[in-house]
């Protein structure tokens, strides 16, 4: 026997409502319930992962650059760094940080802000490098989110490979 259209039309919303109520109830009763709403931006993800690592705005990074109050550390590979990087930046590739750390740290003057960067919002190399530097004892470490792209978009000074 075929179910009537009328019956189907009230059963579908009833099933959706019932499953929503069950799902919300289970989430509420879980010891580690999931947030129903939240800020999933890259800024918020970084802040929630580590409260002591601060993001720096492109404007603030430019100000620190112009006033020579920051050292920029490129967390990308040597090859990407050589193709182009923020002017006067030092290359400390995250995947080879332990091999290169001592050479790079000798070039960092005391009492400057360290700004790590890589390229792309999804790139976490700069975040990992910033955490590493904090654990190594550096106090003022910042991350320039999507650093290389943002720097180029703002037409700020850079060193680039000539083609």
Image (cartoon, rainbow, N blue to C red):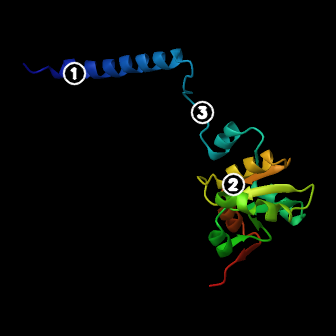
In this figure, which residue is indicated by the disc labeled 1? 8
Q: Which residue is mark 2?
A: 126
- Real-space CA distance between mark 3 and mark 1, rounded to the nearest whole angstrom: 35 Å
- Please identify the quarter of the rendering in which residue 7 is found: top left
Q: In the rendered image, is residue 75 in sight?
A: no
Using the image as rendered, state which of residue 145 and residue 21 is in the foreground.
145
When the figure is inspected, residue 128 is found, relative to residue 85, above or below; the finding is above
Report which quarter residue 161 is drawn in: bottom right
Q: Which mark is residue 135?
A: none
Q: Are marks 2 and 1 in contact (CB under 8 Å)?
A: no
Circle 3 or circle 1, nearest the eye: 3
Give the distance between the C-alpha atoms of the residues marked 2 and 1, in whole angstroms: 54 Å
Q: Is residue 88 above or below residue 121?
A: below
Please report the residue visible at 67 percent of the width from the left and 70 percent of the height from the top. 81
Mark 2 vs mark 3: give the one in front: 2
Instruction: Say whether marks 2 and 3 touch (CB < 8 Å).
Output: no
**Along the viewing direction, whichever of 74 and 43 lies nearer the viewer:** 74
Most extreme residue toward the bottom is: 163
Q: Quadrant of the C terminus?
A: bottom right
> Residue at image x 46%, y 17%?
26
How far separated are the C-alphas under marks 2 and 3? 24 Å
* Front-most of residues 117 and 136: 136
Residue 49 vs residue 96, the one in the foreground: 96
Could you classify mark 1 by the number of other residues whose Cα lies within 10 Å: few (under 14), some (14-19), or many (20 or more)?
few
Q: Position of residue 18 (x, y in %)?
A: 36, 16
Work out whether 11 lies above or below 103: above
């Amino acid at each position: 026997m075929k179910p009537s259209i009328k019956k189907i039309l009230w059963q579908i919303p009833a099933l959706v409502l019932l499953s929503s109520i069950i799902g919300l109830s289970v989430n509420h009763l879980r010891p580690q319930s999931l947030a129903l709403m939240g800020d999933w931006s890259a800024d918020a993800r970084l802040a929630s992962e580590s409260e002591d690592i601060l993001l720096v705005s492109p404007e603030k990074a430019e100000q620190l650059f112009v006033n020579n109050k920051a050292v920029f550390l490129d967390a990308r590979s040597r090859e990407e760094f050589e193709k182009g990087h923020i002017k006067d930046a030092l290359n400390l590739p995250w995947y080879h940080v332990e091999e290169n750390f001592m050479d790079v740290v000798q070039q960092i003057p005391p009492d400057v802000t360290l700004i790590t960067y890589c390229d792309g919002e999804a790139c976490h190399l700069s975040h990992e490098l910033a955490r590493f530097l904090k654990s190594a004892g550096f106090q003022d470490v910042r991350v320039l989110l999507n650093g290389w792209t943002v720097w180029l978009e703002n037409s700020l000074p850079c060193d680039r490979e000539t083609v």
